Amino acid sequence: MSGSDPGKGGMPAMSPAVVVVALALLMGIQPITTDLYLPALPLLARDLHAPMAGVQLTMSVLLLAFGFGQLTMGPVSDRFGRRPVLLGGLGLYTLASVLATLAPDITVLIAMRAVQGVGMAASVVCARAMVRDLYEPHQGAHVMSRGLSGLGVIAMLAPTVGGLVAGWAGWRAALGVVSASGAAMGLFIALKVPETARSLNPHALALGPLLANFRTVLGNATFRAWATLVTFTYAGLFVL
């Protein structure tokens, strides 16, 4: 795949390197938001005088908002485009991260983590949609695999960086790194990633078509199998 390959006909040209970096960053937002934050939980509980149940809730609400947010961000990006949803989601994520860093108590922190989850959903959903916009399936699988390699590197580094930062400067500094990451991603998207949707669907958010699409997806046996596998995998990780 050459550097001048524009992907599907009529789509804006982006070099494969830019696409891969964008994918790695946008999908890597998940381990940054969860794994980088994990080492700071004991410090957070101590400084905010919060019960462990409340501290654990900061992770639970994040994942719930992330999960339910993905159900809506796809249709929203079909209606308004990938770029505005990405920029809006990353802006929301960064703002919530800053407010979480400054949170005076556990209640505010829990609320801001939920907002982070919504912004994170926009990032991950639009990243995958961009691959579909730009490439045919066989090309998209190759590009996605390279992006996932970058995601793997981020996932390996995040807990170590989080532990070092939290140990050196506290849990607020760890969340400050999360805030800076969101801002850097938003800047990268603003400067390097154009709109990739070939056309917008003005009816994407209409209730009838939306419910019909949900029924189609839920009726797919392959989707149900993979969804079940991922559900039990995540459940096992967080229980352990």
Image: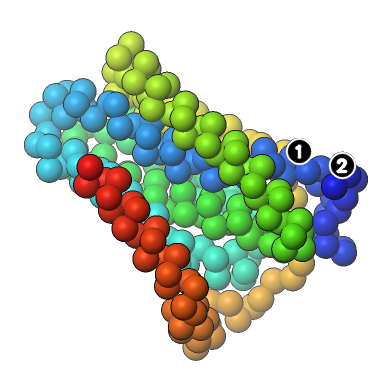
Q: Is residue 6 visible?
A: yes
Please give the name of the residue rendered at 63% of the width and 60% of the height, measured from the top-left corner.
129
Closer-to-camera residue (20/110): 20
Q: Are marks 1 and 2 in contact (CB under 8 Å)?
A: yes
- Residue 166 horizontal side relative to residue 178, left or right: left
In the rendered image, the quadrant that contains the C terminus is top left
Please give the name of the residue rendered at 78% of the width and 43% of the height, measured from the top-left corner.
16
Q: Amino acid at mark 2?
A: Gly
Label 1, residues with CA under 10 Å away: few <14, some 14-19, many ≥20: few
C-alpha gap between disc 1 and disc 2: 8 Å
Say which residue label 1 marks: 17
Say which residue label 2 marks: 3
Vertical arrangement, residue 34 with respect to residue 10, above or below = above
Q: Amino acid at mark 1?
A: Ala
Please give the name of the residue rendered at 38% of the width and 27% of the height, measured from the top-left corner.
159
Q: Which mark is residue 54?
A: none
Mark 1: secondary structure: helix
The x, y position of residue 22, in whole percent, is 65, 42
